[in-house]
Image (tube, rainbow, N blue to C red):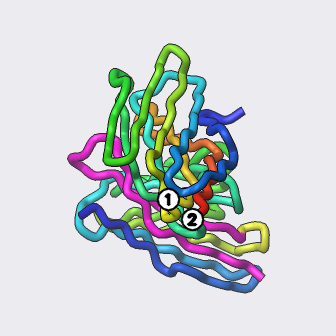
Amino acid sequence: GAVVSQHPSRVICKSGTSVKIECRSLDFQATTMFWYRQFPKKSLMLMATSNEGSKATYEQGVEKDKFLINHASLTLSTLTVTSAHPEDSSFYICSARTLTGGHEQYFGPGTRLTVT
Amino acid sequence: SQQGEEDPQALSIQEGENATMNCSYKTSINNLQWYRQNSGRGLVHLILIRSNEREKHSGRLRVTLDTSKKSSSLLITASRAADTASYFCATVNAGKSTFGDGTTLTVKP
């Protein structure tokens, strides 16, 4: 149980285009999902907290107009990187917290974004 | 510096040996969690220890928490080559997790 999927696993896009990444909780409902960014050999940096039915909460320094988050249902959150640039190339990981569980987060397998 | 700092940054051991990783943090926490990440993959939750607990075991894993020193350790006993991965601690406060930079563990067969 507690499986989180991400799609796509890898994406290459041209500079200036937008890319949407999906995060789904497959066998549980999640009112809260988190989006992280990870640079090579570095830790996860929390970008935003995605709340079902309401606006996402962004961390300081994260541009909300560039990284659009939509948590339309209890099992799906999407992150759209708008007008992508090469510096947006990174590994993006989502996680979901169960409704009933304590504080465990279940992580998706990540999406490798490369902007050329 | 960052909440949840792991030490050492890299650790290389022989199969069968024990591996110990440490994590220090700065602010108060609700709980602390350890995760494992294989290269280029998502994180796998290993163990959660609450702020009122001092030690927890799960299989070959043993985690300790010392809130007075704001530190935690992860011990992997009888390591295997398959344990090769990066290990992160994450402190949880008010529902938000903050990750350290991780320890890269290499277990040589």
Q: Nearer the viewer, residue B1 or A86?
A: B1
- The answer to which image quadrant residue A25 occupies is bottom left
- The answer to which image quadrant residue A36 occupies is bottom right
Q: Name the residue under label 2.
A: B109
Q: Which amino acid does label 1 sit on?
A: Asp
Q: Mark 2 lies on which chain?
A: B
> Is residue B10 placed above or below A111 in the rendered structure?
above
Asked if the stretch drawn in magenta spans residue A65, the answer is no
Q: Which of A63 and B71 is in front in this view?
A: B71
Q: Residue at x 58, y 81 (%)?
A: A10
Q: Residue at x 61, y 33 (%)?
A: B3
Task: Assign a secondary structure to mark 2.
Answer: loop
Q: Can residue A56 be seen in this view?
A: no
Q: Which of B107 and A39 is in front in this view?
A: B107
Asked if the stretch drawn in magenta spans residue A106, the answer is yes
Which disc number belongs to residue B83?
A: 1
Residue B58 rendering spot, x and y as whole percentages: 32, 44
- Region of the chain picked out in magenta, as a range: A89-116
Q: Image check: B58 left or right of B40?
A: left
Task: Assign a secondary structure to mark 1.
Answer: helix
Q: Image check: B15 left or right of B101?
A: left
- The answer to which image quadrant residue A84 occupies is bottom right
Residue A37 rendering spot, x and y as whole percentages: 61, 59
Circle 1 packing at 10 Å, graded few (<14), some (14-19), many (20+), is some
Q: Are marks 2 and 1 in contact (CB under 8 Å)?
A: no
Residue A21 rendering spot, x and y as whole percentages: 51, 74
Q: Is residue B92 visible?
A: yes
Q: What residue type is labelled 2?
A: Pro
Q: In which quarter of the image is the C terminus of chain A?
A: bottom right
